[in-house]
Image (cartoon, helix red, strand yellow):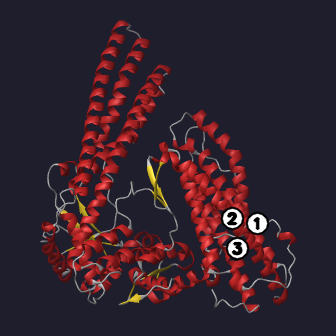
Amino acid sequence: MIAATLELTPHFKKQAKRAAIGITIYILVYLLTLLAAVMLAIGAAYAGIMIIVAAPSIIGLVVGVSVISVGLIVLGVLVGAFFRKKEEDKSIKEEITEHTQPELFKLIYEVAEAVGTDKPNKVYLTPAVNAAVMFNSSFWSMFVPTKRNLIIGLPLLRAVTVDELKGILAHEFGHFSQNSMRVGSYVYNLNMIVVGVLQPNERFKNAVSSWASFSIVSSLFSMFAIWIVGLTQKTQIALYDLMNKRNYALSREMEFQADTIGAKLVGAKPMIRPLVRLSMADSALQMCFGHHQKFFHKTKELPRNVFDVQFGVMRLLAEYNNVEIVGDLPQPSLAASNVFNGTKLKFGEQWATHPDLSSRVENIEKTAADIEDLESPIARVILRDPEELEVRFTKRVFEDVYKTEKVDEVETEKYLDGIQSDIKSTRYPEVFQAYFGYREPRWLPDAETIVPTSDSLEWKELFNPEIHKLAFETMFLEQDKDLLIQLSDKSKTGISTFEYDGRKYKWKEASALASKLSDELRGNKEQLSEHESRMYKSFANWELQHMKESGHFGELWNSVVNMNHELDVSSELTNKMFKSLEFSTQQLEPYQIEAGFRAYRPVELKFKKEVSKLLEAKELLPNISEEIWKDFNEFVEKKWSFFNGRSYNEENLRRLYMILNDFMPVSIELYEVKKRKLLNYMDEIRLRSNQSVEAV
């Protein structure tokens, strides 16, 4: 009965109270707004009828009805939000029972009893690396207790031990025991109202649009009504921020408490290990899906069991990142999991539902029971016929592919070989990873005048922990500076305070801090630029001494530099394309749509030139699907029509947006191809010139 023995912390009580107050404020303001809308509708109806009676003519009728419509439009938006249709849950899940999975249910019931909470109403398996509590968030769930269901991810059972699964289940049952879960039901339903006010349904919008186009008078009054709705929407957004920030703060406290319940059942280590490992497990699964998207158009291959492949990819990632394997599972340390995050900027998790990893680990270590950490098998062993389950779920995950394509099912080893081959082909040479993983080759002012000499630097002077650290810190310094510039506009971020390098700041100080970081960044870049000049000179000299052709290194370096500049141009142009097409998502008159496309065409012409450059590099990108190349080619060669004076050509618009979405990923892939080619050649130069990397 662990849950019953826990006392709520003062901070938990405070956040629960703040969340309840936030919900209450929202409800009161919404009801007042609704009352005002009813009064407006009554007043507008009275005024409109008086106008019609006073001026019994067509004009009087139009003016009177237009006045009445103001109240109806405003009231319609607010009332219609109550009847917004709930989105259909299309997630893949399968209910399991005690009869079909007795060992798993035995464990579930044991943990529920130990925690001191109700058993789950239903248990579902999903294809996600996750476990969660699911309950009915209907309108009535705000007032009547609802039964709670448990979701367990099938790939999760590949990534944790039985003891770790006990801790995860205890965490979820900790949520079962939290009365504050009811707050989530209120917030969910109230958020549905907010969305309904911000995004009225299409039938209502079409009705308003049709009425507005009836006459100039109806158009003017409709614009006035929409202006009032706009004020209401601004209020809703402000209340949404208030309510959700407070709910998220409570949610973080609930996570701490649920972690404590798990830690008291299984101890600290079985709780901490999966917290650190599961991001690697999810990355492995996403890599499986990414490999499918990248290569299926060529191979038509699908894994028979994608979760078995996921397990293999986890071990590959461990091998490539020097992560220890403990009991068949990778075990990255907390320090290693943070090594790729060099930001010093923190926003106090205002919009996070979960605390950061370090805080959760600290809480677990502080509250855990002193329990011996025993060796435990991978949790998959408690499933009955796990292979059949995983194969069936694999078919459900790729269901659309099976319906439309002739699939070649392959075993894990073959599919894993393909992923491993792709990883190797897309990784930089190991000796350059710590520097060029965070740094792009830059234009060197004196590159054309550098003359190779015999006085090259030694390898350990070019690549060493100090210079690696400088490249790493500079990349994150630039990211922090850019975020601070955005943060200086509070109206866009809603963030009032933040931390940088352990010190707390107000949002007004963001601009001054960004300026300070800019100065530091300038110094770092100058230092790196000088270092890269020496690097360039050394490699050019080694090439001259040891390679058959000299000058190739410089050509490759400049090709990467130029492509990096092209990426900036391409990104800016893609944004201009999206902006020039914004009108196509709005309800406009035909003449406005035609004017929009006239303004779009000059931007399209520039964009076509950039797409043409990618087509010229097609041979360098064999993994890009022929369908993408076909769309690129037709877009460049033809002038697509998007509007016929009455309606849009939906197919051409769809293809245009597909091209816009594909353009930057293909451009980045081309850049990566060129960068890898440069680094592979630099590695060849290193090997030919006998440069030792032992000192690094």
**Residue 480, disc:** none
The 10 Å Cα crowd at callout 1, few under 14, some 14 to 19, many 20 or more, is some
Tag nearer the camera, 3 or 2: 2
Tag nearer the camera, 1 or 3: 1
Pointer 1 or 2: first along the chain: 1
Residue topped by disc 2: 525
Residue 61's x, y, as percent? 39, 15
**Residue 443, disc:** 1
Residue topped by disc 3: 674
Separation of residues labelled 3 and 2 (CA atoms): 23 Å
The one nearer the camera, 570 or 269, is: 269
Separation of residues labelled 1 and 3 (CA atoms): 15 Å
Compared to residue 338, the image places residue 201 above or below, namely above
Residue 215's x, y, as percent? 48, 22
Residue type indicated by callout 1: Trp
Pointer 3 or 2: first along the chain: 2
Question: Helix or strand or loop: what does disc 2 sit on?
Answer: helix
Residue 93's x, y, as percent? 30, 69
The 10 Å Cα crowd at callout 2, few under 14, some 14 to 19, many 20 or more, is some
Pointer 1 or 3: first along the chain: 1
